Amino acid sequence: MLRPVTPKVEERRERFSIADINLMVHTFYAQVRDDEELGPIFERRIDSWPEHLERMVLFWRAVLRSEPTFTMSERGAPPVLHWSMEEVERHHYQRWLSLFSEVVEGIYEPDDAEQVFAAASRIAEAFSRYLPADANEGER
């Protein structure tokens, strides 16, 4: 049974349209694929880009619009899947956030962009929480 939509959720759904979420996800991952640092990691991990993009749109719809659109993969919860990626270090998440911020700022009004980026920051923290510090982290 679906929960009733509260006024707060209605307001979020007005602010974060499905079209904008779709644009955000597709624009962001196009930049990720072209990125020298992140592109090779994603290319090794993503078997089907159309499926991944569709899954990420559903994920962000759940995050931003409180829609029950995202279901956990049979391979595990998103943080657990990311924790198992041996080649990923903390600085990769900083790069991920930098690209994400650029995309979000180009799509959303400042207050909405800030809210989207805050959600992305929480996700990056959850995914990188158990990673050791980068060897050269103090030099950055």
Image: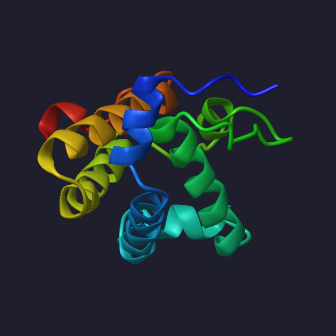
Figure coloring: rainbow
Q: Position of residue 56 (x, y in %)?
A: 58, 54
**Picture quadrant of residue 75:** top right
Q: Position of residue 121 (x, y in %)?
A: 33, 33
69 is higher (above) or lower (below) than 5:
below
Q: Position of residue 87 (x, y in %)?
A: 54, 49
Residue at 37 percent of width and 64 percent of height = 37
Front residue (pair 80, 118)? 118
Q: How many marks?
A: 0
119 left or right of 101 in image: right
83 left or right of 115 in image: right
25 left or right of 110 in image: right
Residue at 13 percent of width and 46 percent of height = 110
Residue at 38 percent of width and 71 percent of height = 27
86 is higher (above) or lower (below) than 49:
above
Looking at the rendered image, the quarter that the C terminus falls into is: top left
**Picture quadrant of residue 93:** top left
Front residue (pair 88, 12)? 12
52 is higher (above) or lower (below) than 120:
below
Front residue (pair 92, 108)? 108
The reply to whether residue 31 is in sight is yes
The reply to whether residue 134 is in sight is no
Looking at the rendered image, the quarter that the N terminus falls into is: top right
